[in-house]
Structures are given as C-alpha cells and as structure tokens.
Image (cartoon, rainbow, N blue to C red):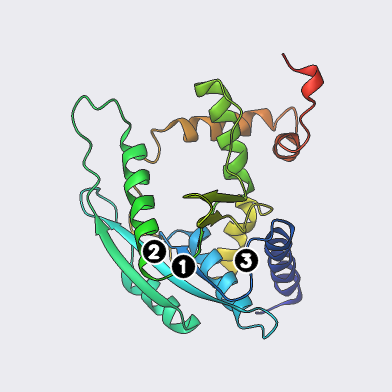
Amino acid sequence: MGNKEEKLFMREFFRKAGKAIYDYNMIEEGEKILVGVSGGKDSLALLEVLALRARDPKKHYTVVAAHIAVENVVYETDHIYIQELCDRLGVELIVRTVNTEVKENSGKPACFVCSWNRRKALFEIAKEWGCTKLALGHHRDDAVESLLMSMMFNGTMASMPPKLAMFDGTFTLIRPFIYITNAETTQYAAYRNFRKQKKLCPHERATNRDAVRRLLQEMETFSPHVRNNLFAAMKNIQQEYLP
C-alpha cells in the first residue's frame, strides 16, 4: 500500500465504510451482495472495499458484481479492466446490455431514462443471482446534491437514504459510502491507480446535478462547512419550526 500517509488514509477509508455498514445494519450474515459497477472511481472503490472486507473470517457474506452497458449512448467503459479487477478480487462479474432510447415528447430527461433502465437491469440480475442487497457507490456529496436538487426543483425534502427496503421488504438498496466524500473516493482511486473511463457520458455536464455541484462550490466560499452542515441537517430536522 506504500507510505505511511497512504496506509493511514486507507485505514480511515475502510473505517468509514465499515461504520456506515454497522450504523445502518447494511449487511447481514450469509447474504449475497450485488455491487453495481459502472467503471467509475466510486463503484470500483466500493467493489474493492466490499470484496476485501468479505475476506475477513468474521464477515460472512459474498459479493457479486454487475456492469450494465448502454448500447445507444456514446460513452465507453473498459469492460476488460473491470473483469481484471473482479478476477483479482475473486468476484463473479455479470455484464448486461440495455437500450435507453428516449421516446420523442416523453418529457423525461435522457439521464432519468438511462438511470431507470440500468437500475431495472440491476434488480433483475440481483433476483436471478439470489442477491438480497444491491450496493451502489453513492457518497456523501451525492446525497447532499440530491437534497438540494429535491428542494430546488421538486419542492420536496428527499435525498439518497443509506439503506432503502424495496419490493415489500424483500430486497434492499444500500450505500456503504454514505460517510465518505467525493474527495476521498478520488484520493482512493489515485492511490489504487484505477483506470479512468475512456469517454464520459455526453449528457453528464448538462444536468441539474452538475448545476447544483457548481452552486455548492460557490456556497463553500462563504460557508466552508456547508456540505457537512447540509448532510447533518438531514438527521436534525426540527419539525416544530417548520410550516
């Protein structure tokens, strides 16, 4: 793992992921966890963390990885690299291709349609492989951005829950990186020399999320702890002072 600074960082990174798993009881004994792997730094880091934790004799769960390829969106992911990582970790990889064509006059953004179809494919794979949990690489900054997006564009207070029971409780979505920041997953990827995606999605820079991301950067200029405070606010709602 290299120098002392890197070792300390890795220890803290794994500690934060483990704390989230413990705090929200994300993984139970004997479960099979499906990890959604896009090929980006967050999902690669999540796959590695969960797979390495599963090697601990005290942890009794197994990991399966799934990558959803999108046939009609011009971006590239190195499937071979994902397979090589899975082979090194001893994790089975399932690859499936979906079509995310947006119908004319549907009124639905391309990103929504793409995300929904990829998530649907992951649910199908989880069912086929007997996985009770789907783990996604969303981190704390994603949750904060989602909170602001919900308030600004939908007039609601909602975000990305660390653990979400679905389909009458028969299946659960988990986010073990909920305590980890984007900066930390970026640093993790740098230490581990993860390969970047060949090309990013063409819609990535034309979304409300990207606009909110820029807004948060501006807010940090006069409130350096704004991300921490917004994240904390989601668990500190004072109902008596709301309409």
Query: Within 10 angstroms of label 1, few (less than 14), some, or many (20 or more) residues?
Result: many
Between the C-alphas of marks 1 and 2, the distance is: 6 Å
Q: CA distance from mark 1 to mark 3?
A: 11 Å
- Tell me which amino acid carries mark 2: Lys
Mark 3 against mark 2, which lies toward the viewer?
2
Kindly identify the residue that appears in the image at 45 percent across and 79 percent down: 91
Residue that mark 1 sits on: 131
Amino acid carrying mark 3 in the image: Ile
Give, as a three-letter code, the residue at label 1. Answer: Cys
x then y, percent, for residue 201 = 34, 47
Number of other residues with Cα within 10 Å of mark 3, as a class: few under 14, some 14 to 19, many 20 or more = many
Label 2 Cα neighbours within 10 Å, binned few <14 / some 14-19 / many ≥20:
some
| Vertical comparison of 141 with 137: above or below | above
Image point (33%, 66%), residue name: 78
To which quarter of the image does residue 215 belong? Answer: top right
Quadrant position of the C terminus in the picture: top right
Distance from Cα at disc 3 to Cα at disc 2: 17 Å
Label pair 1/2, CB-CB below 8 angstroms: yes
Percent of width and height locating residue 56:
66, 83
Residue 27 shows which numbered tag? 3
Decide: marks 3, 2 in contact (CB < 8 A)?
A: no
Q: Is residue 136 visible?
A: no
Question: In the displayed image of the protein, which residue is found farthest to the front?
Answer: 168
Which residue appears at 74% of the width and 62% of the height?
A: 19
- Residue 85 higher or lower than 234, as above or below: below
The quarter of the picture where residue 239 lies is: top right
- Residue 204 in the image, given as x and y percentages of width and height: 39, 41
Residue 186 in sight here: yes
